[in-house]
Image (spheres, helix red, strand yellow):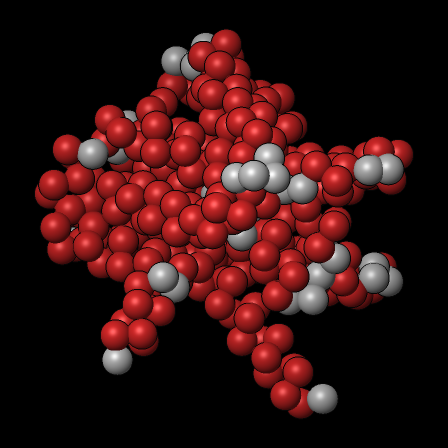
């Protein structure tokens, strides 16, 4: 029984769902942790990017295309869909800006393990994710700076510095964590640090906006609709197009994840830092929708495998 309980506590899906539930139940305490979310995310990004192997970058000539494609799918394709939908449906500028932040956010690190689980091209997923992480230094200031002009604008330099602190520096530090003497220990604790770190961030975002979940169902419904169409809908259309274009199934699977999976923890912290609590509502809901989509993909694969 204790073994089963321990296994449940270490399950990523359970941890994220628990974070949402606790945010709803005891979210009034979330304000105490708001100022720590930036630092927690920096630690999470450092450990999570240890999953991106430096060896996957070679030969460099073969890696350029996946890096470019990963960046275009994550920012341009997903960004165009989610910004258009939110501009049409969101009732306040703050909520719209929350979606702008999501559009400018790097892919979730779940792209890599789920690419393996779903039978995708693992190397393609790693390189595509790395390309999208690095290009966030360019895309995030560009996207947020462009669309935040409706609210007075954001200093691009401030955004660039934040992206360096949350993407580039953690990525560089993660290379040292792959040093052979400490690598086994890092790999052993990486999952727990990343899962509980993201849970801390999601709890804070849900807690700060718990009144929306209990009272303003219209906003919750609209936010959920945009995210459902932008993730489930876009993923479905992308799958159909990939088949028609004859894209190799393993590569199409990894590309599907790159075009739909965003880092909810990253978007929460960025939205809170730049635009305030209301802007973080879409990111809090994003965590639930992304989790649901990944579970859907997993169950779909199991069902297909069972039929073979």
Residue placed at 86% from the left, 37% from the top?
Answer: 59
For the image, the number of numbered tags is 0
Q: Can residue 174 be seen in this view?
A: yes
Q: Residue furthest front?
A: 181
Front residue of 241/175: it is: 175
Q: Is residue 8 above or below residue 252?
A: below
Q: Where does the image place residue 107, in percent across and percent down from the top left?
A: 56, 42
Q: Is residue 11 above or below residue 61?
A: below
Q: Tell me the quadrant of the picture where the N terminus can be found.
A: bottom left
Q: Is residue 223 visible?
A: no
Front residue of 171/95: it is: 171
Image quarter of residue 193 = top left
Q: Where does the image place residue 123, in percent across and percent down from the top left?
A: 74, 50
Front residue of 35/180: it is: 180
Q: Where does the image place residue 114, in percent across and percent down from the top left?
A: 59, 60
Residue placed at 69% from the left, 49% from the top?
Answer: 125
Residue placed at 71% from the left, 61% from the top?
Answer: 120
Q: Tell me the quadrant of the picture where the C terminus can be found.
A: bottom right
Left or right of residue 295: residue 22: left
Front residue of 42/107: it is: 42
Residue placed at 29% from the left, 44% from the top?
Answer: 200
Q: In this view, does 167 lie above or below 87?
A: above
Q: Where does the image place residue 275, in percent across and percent down from the top left?
A: 33, 25
Q: Residue furthest bottom?
A: 307
């Amino acid at each position: 029984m204790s073994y089963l309980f321990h296994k449940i506590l270490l399950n990523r899906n359970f941890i994220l769902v628990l974070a949402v539930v606790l945010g709803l139940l005891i979210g009034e305490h979330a304000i105490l942790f708001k100022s720590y979310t930036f630092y927690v995310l920096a630690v999470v990004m450092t450990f999570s990017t240890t999953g991106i192997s430096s060896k996957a970058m070679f030969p460099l000539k073969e890696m350029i295309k996946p890096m470019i494609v990963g960046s275009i799918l994550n920012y341009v394709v997903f960004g165009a869909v989610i910004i258009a939908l939110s501009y049409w449906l969101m009732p306040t500028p703050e909520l719209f800006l929350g979606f702008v932040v999501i559009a400018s956010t790097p892919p979730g690190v779940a792209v890599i393990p789920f690419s393996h689980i779903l039978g995708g091209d693992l190397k393609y997923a790693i390189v595509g994710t790395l390309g999208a992480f690095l290009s966030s230094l360019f895309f995030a200031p560009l996207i947020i700076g462009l669309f935040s002009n409706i609210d007075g604008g954001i200093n691009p330099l401030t955004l660039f510095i934040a992206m360096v602190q949350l993407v580039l520096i953690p990525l560089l530090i993660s290379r040292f964590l792959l040093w052979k003497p400490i690598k086994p220990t890092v790999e052993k604790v990486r999952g727990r640090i990343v899962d509980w770190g993201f849970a801390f961030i999601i709890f804070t975002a849900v807690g700060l906006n718990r009144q929306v979940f209990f009272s303003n169902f219209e906003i919750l419904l609209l936010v959920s609709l945009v995210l459902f169409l932008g993730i489930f809908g876009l993923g479905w259309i992308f799958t159909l197009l990939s088949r028609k274009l004859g894209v190799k199934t393993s590569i199409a699977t990894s590309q599907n994840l790159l075009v739909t999976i965003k880092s909810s923890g990253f978007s929460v912290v960025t939205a809170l830092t730049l635009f305030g609590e209301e802007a973080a509502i879409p990111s809090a809901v994003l965590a639930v929708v992304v989790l649901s989509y990944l579970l859907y993909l997993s169950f779909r694969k199991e069902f297909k495998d069972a039929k073979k």
